[in-house]
Image (spheres, helix red, strand yellow):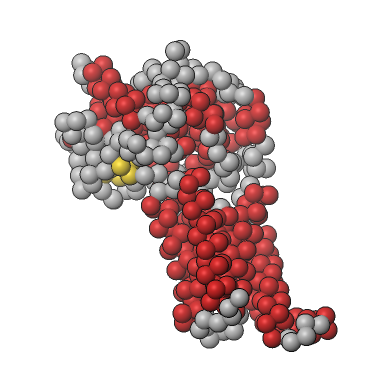
Amino acid sequence: MSWIAGSFLVLGAALAAGFAWYERRHPSTRVLALVATLAALAALGRIAFAALPNVKPTTDIVLIAGYVLGGAPGFVVGAVAALASNLFFGQGPWTPWQMAAWGAVGLFGAVLAKLTRRRLGRVPLAVACGAAGFGFGAVMNTAEWIMYSGDHTLPKLVTQFATAFSFDAAHAIGNVVFCLAFGPALIQALARYRTRFEITWAPVAAASAALVLAAGLHQPASAQAQSTSAGYLQRAQNADGGWGATPGQASSPLVSGWAALGLAAAGHSPTTVRKRASALAYVKAHPGSDTGSLERTILVLATAGRVPSRLTSQLISRRAGNGSFAGRVNTTAFAILALRAAGRSRRDGSVRRAASWILKQANTDGGFNFATRGSPSGIDDTGAAVQALAAAGLRTTRTARRAADYLARSQNADGGFPLQRGAGSNAQSTAWAIQGLLAVGRNPAAVRRGNGRDGVAYLRSLTAPNGEVRYSRTSRQTPVWVTGQALLALARKPLPIGRVTP
């Protein structure tokens, strides 16, 4: 087999893995763009450090891609990075070996994530990147021995490894240094992207964000608006019981979870919301493997009073020694909400320790970041944290009150709320802010800039005649999960919702 055929064979394997991942997970175009961007970044990282033999951040980027996004994306990032960077370094019989080796690094990152539940600290992660460097070197040394040794004797293989040791060591040491410098930051950024944006921005159910929320706070339009938004979601449901980004699109566990929660808040049990299969059946069949998916699944099942104890135990087993879940405010907040929905009391050890950890993550401005203290505060994440503190019985604490003040201060002149202070308003963040304010007992209708309008009025201004609500004034599309956020606010029931009687 020629090296060209070998390259295309490995590339074909990468594409097959990518297609399999796509068919199983149905990632959004944003996530696909992220995979492509990481592949380009890995290739450019290799080119940028060409002057330093074997010292390059490529292996770290590929490993982290697999660690955060999974095996198939990690393999694709590694294989494509090798092929693309060799347009600069030169293609040859070594190309398929490099593609396979870096693809394997991506798979190694996914295995690490599975074994450690993505809890590796900076130093262990750096050690893993160093080991990946030696692993990559082992593959390439074997390739050299196969392609150029002639008689393929064991002494020649040993000589090949001995000759290349200094280069492999430089690769491994470089990986460790690069990982110590940027590894955790890159993981945090990718995890934030995956959790926040692994959704499809589309017009389905967009209306619910504004319409339903507005109806819940401004009578007498409440019943009509709630019915309109709930009906919109019900019509968008697929035959398998789930929801996609648009009517007819394949169902997504993330979108389906929020749609089911939103309808539950409006009084529709997931056992009765169905086309052919029920919403409950879809959610039960697609619990997901990451912490966030598990939490969302528990919240939905709790609305039907059907949370298996094994799921609660599985979630508790993911609690770190410091009380957090996955080391992030967002996942820790939803862990509290899920445990409370599953029947755990405020005095439960996991609930108390998680809440104590969240209290320590408040920034000096009163807000919370997606991950930990010190990073910029965000409205969405502050809204989630406040709901968790309230569920844990801490709604009257100074931290909860300061977080609510942060939300109020972040309101824009148009009445809406931005993702972060100073940015433009959007429906999603406005819904999160209103939920947070409700959680601590504040009336969102009374929160307004000067004599301007409140958040509900802002959401109503985005509502189209057909019930669709734009994400912002400059956008014609809205993420489906805003529907769930809005319906929760409409019902004045911040998470957890509790059981909904069919």
x and y percentages locating residue 197 in the rendered image: 41, 47
Relative to 154, residue 184 above or below = above
- Looking at the picture, tell me which residue is in the foreground, 303 or 349: 303
- Looking at the picture, tell me which residue is in the foreground, 59 or 99: 99
Quadrant location of residue 142?
Answer: bottom right
Residue, x 45% and y 45% (percent of image)? Answer: 26
x and y percentages locating residue 421 in the rendered image: 32, 48
Left of 269 or right of it: where is 174? right
Residue, x 58% and y 23% (percent of image)? Answer: 307
Left of 476 or right of it: where is 407? right
Which residue in the rendered view is the most extreme toward the front?
Answer: 1
Res. 78 visible in picture: yes
Residue, x 46% and y 59% (percent of image)? Answer: 35
For the C terminus, give its image quadrant: top left
Quadrant location of residue 348?
Answer: top right
x and y percentages locating residue 491 in the rendered image: 35, 21
Relative to 7, residue 273 above or below = above
Relative to 106, residue 90 above or below = below
